[in-house]
């Protein structure tokens, strides 16, 4: 079975090389082992012709409910790669994904489907409206807050641009009535974006006024803000405060506002939004992920005058006394999520490689509304005694709905020949 996994991965990078095996793979579609049959079909989806897509999708639909979530994600990855190769098949692929969305499954399985549908909608205008309808049906019975908010944000962004935006408002307002506070708050914002349309504004304002008595402060505040904003009839404000994007890091914005409120400087000085970094440091610039899942993206050099991600990391790390003598930073990894998105305290990790040391940087986010975390540290246990821990830097305090960084550094084993790099 492991060999078939390898074949699937190779097919995503070198489809022409694997295409020579298509005749043999066709015979495996009817294999009694559904896992092998699934891998055979997903490989054919990555290497076959456009004319074979419909037949293969029908075959895999007949037994997709019988396989595990792990193999279902493999199928979704194959569908995602098809979106790039055969854009005209988007309607067929959306229908297949919507049927998978109705099946039972865990968070990661559902997230993989939602991410793929969102990409199809954003990349293919013809698939936008049917894709949004499928997502509306999904949030009617969605138990994952993260996925519900992701779909609502997309509806608020793309829904007003559709030919009949009014039909989406009902699905959004249902979330205000039936969902927990975080989803209700996002639903209010998504609904307000439809109010930018002149023909829908009066109806949206009426629905917003019904939210003014909500039990949650955030929901009431958002409803009040948008109701007052619509009363101004100022199109410029609509563009800046509703449809416009706030290109700053939310966590750093909260931190800057707290510092502004607690500072001893005169309060008549307005808060300067430009002082807030546009992306959280030292995480670096966030890029839009590629739709081609299995293709390794080429390295992109930063524009002249702009710092690379490693340079930003190095500048931040050298400001910490314990790391100032580690020398030049060679490489930093992409952020790796260590916890599920649904948990109350999320942790992600970035690895920084120096000549003789490796630093693990953990970003801990506290989503609890009534608790403050103090002296936060992540304990790292090496697999070998050759790895010597040289320092551990805790995060003194992480307030509610905020994030902080903690670090653990190890000295590389002496036999690690990194000096030749």
Image (cartoon, rainbow, N blue to C red):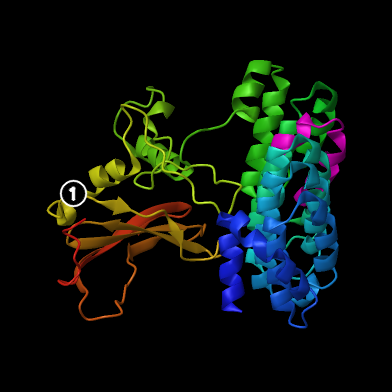
Asked where in the image residue 47 lies, by quadrant, the reply is bottom right
Does 288 sit left or right of 267 as displayed? right
Quarter that holds the C terminus: bottom left
Secondary structure under tag 1 reads loop
Does 400 sit left or right of 289 as displayed? left
Q: Is residue 406 visible?
A: yes
- Indicate whether residue 223 is drawn in magenta: no
Residue 387 point in image, percent of width and height: 22, 74
Residue that lies at the very extreme toward the bottom in this rendered image:
32
Residue 311 point in image, percent of width and height: 27, 41
Q: How many marks?
A: 1
Residue 221 vs residue 345, the one in the foreground: 345
Residue 352 vs residue 233, the one in the foreground: 352
Residue name at image x 43 percent, y 35 percent = 278
Residue name at image x 37 percent, y 29 percent = 303
Residue name at image x 83 percent, y 33 percent = 165
Does 257 sit left or right of 104 as displayed? left
Quarter that holds the N terminus: bottom right
Residue 33 point in image, percent of width and height: 73, 82
Residue that lies at the very extreme toward the left in this rendered image:
325
Q: Which residues are magenta?
A: 156-177
Residue name at image x 33 percent, y 39 percent = 308
Residue 11 point in image, percent of width and height: 60, 60
Q: Is the magenta region chiefly helix, strand or loop?
A: helix
Image height of 222 relative to 374, above or below: above
Q: Which residue is mark 1?
A: 328
């Amino acid at each position: 079975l492991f060999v078939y996994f390898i074949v699937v991965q190779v097919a995503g990078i070198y489809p022409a090389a694997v295409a020579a095996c298509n005749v043999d793979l066709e015979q495996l579609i009817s294999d009694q082992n559904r896992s092998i049959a699934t891998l055979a079909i997903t490989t054919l989806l990555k290497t076959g012709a456009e004319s074979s897509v419909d037949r293969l999708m029908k075959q895999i639909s007949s037994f997709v409910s019988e396989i595990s979530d792990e193999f279902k994600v493999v199928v979704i990855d194959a569908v995602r790669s098809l979106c790039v190769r055969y854009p005209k098949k988007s309607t067929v692929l959306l229908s297949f994904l919507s049927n998978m969305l109705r099946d039972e499954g865990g968070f990661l399985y559902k997230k993989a489907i939602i991410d793929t549908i969102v990409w199809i909608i954003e990349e293919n205008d013809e698939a936008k409206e049917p894709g949004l309808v499928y997502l509306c049906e999904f949030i009617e019975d969605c138990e994952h807050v993260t996925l519900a908010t992701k779909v609502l944000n997309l509806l608020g962004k793309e829904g007003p641009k559709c030919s009949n935006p009014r039909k989406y408002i009902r699905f959004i307002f249902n979330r205000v009535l039936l969902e927990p506070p975080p989803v209700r708050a996002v639903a209010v914002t998504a609904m307000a974006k439809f109010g930018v349309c002149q023909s829908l504004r009066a109806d949206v304002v009426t629905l917003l006024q019904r939210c003014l008595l909500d039990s949650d402060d955030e929901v009431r505040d958002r409803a009040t803000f948008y109701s007052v904003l619509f009363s101004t009839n100022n199109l410029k404000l609509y563009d800046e405060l509703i449809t416009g994007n706030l290109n700053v890091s939310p966590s750093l914005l909260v931190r800057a506002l707290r510092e502004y409120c607690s500072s001893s400087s005169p309060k008549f000085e307005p808060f300067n939004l430009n002082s807030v970094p546009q992306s959280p440091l030292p995480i670096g610039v966030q890029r839009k992920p590629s739709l081609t899942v299995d293709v390794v993206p080429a390295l992109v050099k930063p524009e002249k005058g702009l710092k690379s991600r490693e340079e930003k990391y190095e500048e931040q790390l050298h400001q910490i006394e314990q790391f100032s003598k580690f020398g030049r930073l060679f490489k930093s990894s992409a952020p790796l999520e260590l916890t599920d998105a649904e948990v109350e305290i999320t942790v992600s990790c970035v690895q920084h490689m120096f000549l003789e040391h490796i630093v693990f940087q953990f970003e801990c986010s506290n989503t609890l509304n009534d608790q403050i975390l103090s002296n936060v540290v992540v304990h790292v246990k090496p697999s070998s005694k050759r790895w010597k821990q040289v320092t551990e830097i805790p995060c003194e305090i992480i307030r509610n709905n905020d994030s902080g960084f903690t670090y653990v550094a190890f000295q590389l084993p002496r036999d690690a020949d990194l000096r030749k790099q």
